[in-house]
Amino acid sequence: MSLPQRFLDWFSARGWAPRAHQLAVLDHAQARESVLLISPTGGGKTLAGFLPSLAEITERGSGEGIHTLYISPLKALAVDIARNLEAPIAEMKLPVTVETRTGDTPHSKRQRQRQKPPDILITTPEQVSLLVADPHAAHLLKGLRTVILDELHSMVTSKRGVLLSLALTRVQSHAPEAIRIGLSATVADPDALRAWLASTGAEPAPLVLGKPGAKPEIRILSSVERVPWSGHSSLYAIPEVYEEIKRARMTLIFVNTRSQAEMVFQALWEANDDNLPIALHHGSLDVAQRRKVEAAMGEGKLRAVVCTSTLELGIDWGDVDLVVHVGAPKGSSRLLQRIGRSNHKLDLPSQALLVPSNRFEVLECTAALQAAEVNAQDTEYPMVMKLDVLAQHILGRACAGPFHPDELFGEVSSAWTYRKLTRVEFDKAVDYVATGGYALRAYERYAKLKLQADGTLRLAHPRLAMAYRLNMGTIVEDEMLKVRLAHVKRRLGKRVVVGGRVLGEVEEWFVSQLTVGQTFVFAGEVLRFEGLDEFGALATRSNDREPMVPSYQGGKFPLSTYLAERVRQMLADPKSWKDLPPQVRGWLSLQRFRSVVPKAGQMLVETFPRADKHYMVCYPFEGRLAHQTLGMLLTRRLERAGMQPLGFVASEYALVIWMVRDLSLAISSNRIALGRLFDEDMMGDDLEAWMAESALMKRTFRNAAIIAGLIERRQPGKEKTARQMTVNTDLIYDVLRTHEPDHLLLRAAWDDAAEGLIDAHRLGAMLRRIKGQILHKALDTVSPLSVPILLDIGRESVYGEGHDALLAEAANALIDEAMRLV
Amino acid sequence: MSRSHRITLSGVDFIPDLSGALFAPEFNALLVADLHLEKGTSLARRGVHLPPYDTRESLLQLKAAVESTRPQRLIFLGDSFHDQGARERIDASDLAMLRAITAKVETVWITGNHDPAPPEDVGGMIVEEMVLGPVSLRHHQKALRDGEAEISGHLHPAAAIHARGHRIRCRCFIADEKRLIMPAFGSYTGALSVRSEAFEGLFGDFHVWMIGDKAVHRFPAAQVR
């Protein structure tokens, strides 16, 4: 069977023909096989996913229950997809009903969807989990034939994807016949995605490749201005970026962080002599504000939008003909995904301009450009097996009705993500859900799951199902505070600040470092901080042009391993420097003259004195997180070796540690061997000892505790403030570590930290890589390559072990001040 | 080891301990506020299964504080038990540890809003308020009479300061020359900023003694955020 006649007519009436990959997906679907379609944006991917369902529903007739579940990573995208589907359905007069179900769907509509389900339900991963936790799930899903997973590549790398993979096992149990169609952008390892789509032990889903799009045209801004040595603001390039905006019809300007977006937007606005309509779009802005920007883009009313990854995914928002990437893109795939936003049509090349913010970023941008030229991908491997996510799933399973642990174990391990789950681990997770899983069996009588005579486990109380619905999900946000625009009034001669409309939300840690009267950039304006009230932060508009709190931050994504390797190779090969701008070439040549440039495979370590301190700089190029961990561990070792280290700063590319003692001398007199210092064995006890105490661990523990349901984000009827939660999880972490160091949640937090904030896996791989490959250079003074990281000292906050040192320092500073007065 | 601090109220010296307890050398008494024993099991009834070691943890800390200061008297400033059912839920070994502590020192339980009637079989006597020389000890703050000084608990004070771009928040003692409020001792007790409304009008020009990991640090009101 192929495409019904009215579909073919519809295509030809538009002068189109079904594309090869669309027909290939149809073939697989009609053979009742799951399939993975990898195709660039603009290739008719969404339609390829829907065609089999539309054809089959037309055949079987509408109103037979949910036929197709379409899962999209973004709420907004789900709504857009539904709207885009309306046209072909109406034009072909198909008897197909389409509805969406997201977090915003009102209760009444959900009820109606239960009574009279649509043929196609477009929804998000969290909603699928909620759906299968519903006692009516079996009835709702029994006629299901197809599950379409959109933007699969973006979902599988996080805990969201892990939770989704578990929800899909439940879907499969209710509808064993259903097939899965995965839609994905190009990834580094398609086989992993193919396996992800299939069940454990089954054949991986066959792969269909769409026709590649036209090769993108990427340039790197060669500024006439001096490229800064360090920093992330790229302000030097604003006039040139503005000229580019003027030449293009519509420009998307991608940056890596919210604060960068604010800075760049502010600077462009200053430069905007022609009053071009330029807008700002990032995740902390108020939703209504974001929708307004998207609508204006769609209508072609804007000339440029400064955005973060919020505009990276999804459908077309207008005729973007240029993508500017301010700051290094951190990964080849991320760059390709982002520049795919311009000329969203297959046959036209995307136009992109990279704007490095500093000299190392010039190297990184060059590497990214070369990687994009050959379409090299460096997407992350899918995330697998998280115990906190499993715990959440088990509770959700119990909400749907009593279950037998043997059956659930079989079901869970049928997910590719949990194929290595052992029965012991699974039982521990069940035990955790039931009573907290403590060796001290204190909570048997308060168990959430009760064992029945027939061996099944039953939810102890309906209230727990309500709590599950309120708290499920894997996205744990930073503690955010609303920022409201305030008015200042005079009452009885007193200055009174009254809150007004909400501008958006900002991380609480950011607000906590502000004092009243300080200015900062938010929502595209310079604001004056006026204080806090019970609803959040209050701020007024300020006339300051220079905000007092710049909040510079590095990218939140670490440099990909692949790009790092390319940068190292470029550095090692002076012949390749000819592609670099003259300033950067000059800088590297000077490095070769004054110090040394490491060969491929080597890691350079420089030691030199400066202003009565001694410095060690190394250049692993492994990203800031891994470097921070390395800094922490090396500092401990240098301390033990009596070198009296004073502090360190890590960047994406390098690490500097400074100390009292002369390290060059210690090395030349064989008191310290660099090979020993950088030995892999630091990943053992030292890492463990440090991690246990680290504030980073407390943060990952908090996330795991929330996902696993130890802490409720929301209780029915009342919102708990994030502040109260932080305090509590820190205390719990300490108690658990003392009394039950092997607890499931500590293990979950440890795994997360090793992969994430501490990046231990990457650090370990790096230490193995440089074994016997350390190139040491003792210098009399600073080297050219070390200047950027040295400039970061003082700008980046120095990482302290505990708070006591800082408290003591603050107290002593006061004493010093007092002494001066005497 | 840093030098120990002294807080003076009506001429009586008190030493804030790193554990969160307060030692009165003149009276050889150790003061402890807001233990909230069995808070963990209290939450468990709602299906929140925090590690059931909070009571043990608090008692171990208490035992260590008693052993290091060797007081003659141990005075609890109320909310020692999280609720009226705490005595019934407490684990046998934890109960034994508590009794072992109170057996060695003269113990007084001041009542609090969480424990208006503390258990009578855990050693010591139960009172609503008491005095230590010129200083009144009670759970909840009261308006002070002329010349009266007071030590209380209930509010679980915490303070934050800024240092090198970091905001550091810890439990603290807070006091001026007439009034002292102690931090909560219990291991699952949250804390309330001394800048919040609940503290308004209680203090004149105050100081806080913040409890770090290794030492107690004193700051003037002006530095507290």
Image: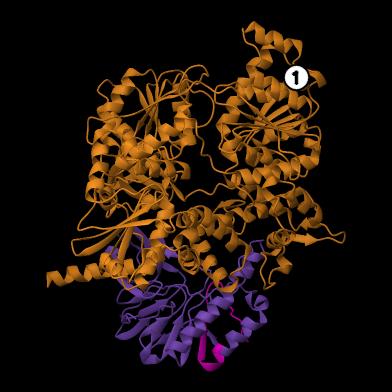
Chain colours: A orange, B purple
Residue A145 seen from this side: yes
Across and down, in percent, residue A345 comes to 51, 18
Quadrant holding the N terminus of chain A: top right
Residue A301 image-quadrant placement: top left
Q: Is residue A600 left or right of residue A13?
A: left
Tell me which chain the residue with mark 1 is part of: A
Q: Is residue A435 above or below residue A348?
A: below
Residue A370 image-quadrant placement: top left
**Magenta stretch contains residue A689:** no
Q: Is residue A790 left or right of residue A286?
A: left
Residue underneath mark 1: A55
Q: Which residues are magenta?
A: B101-124
Query: Which residue is most to the left?
Result: A822
Which sits in the foreground, A65 or B28? A65
SS for callout 1: helix
**Magenta stretch contains residue B114:** yes
Q: Is residue A752 above or below residue A225?
A: below
Residue A521 image-quadrant placement: top left
Which sits in the foreground, A654 or A700? A654
Across and down, in percent, residue A21 comes to 65, 22
Across and down, in percent, residue A530 comes to 31, 47
Residue B205 seen from this side: no
Which sits in the foreground, A448 or A336? A336
Across and down, in percent, residue B29 comes to 43, 88
Which sits in the foreground, A353 or A360? A360
Quadrant holding the C terminus of chain A: bottom left
Q: Amino acid at mark 1?
A: Ala
Q: Residue at x 32, y 70 (%)?
A: A670
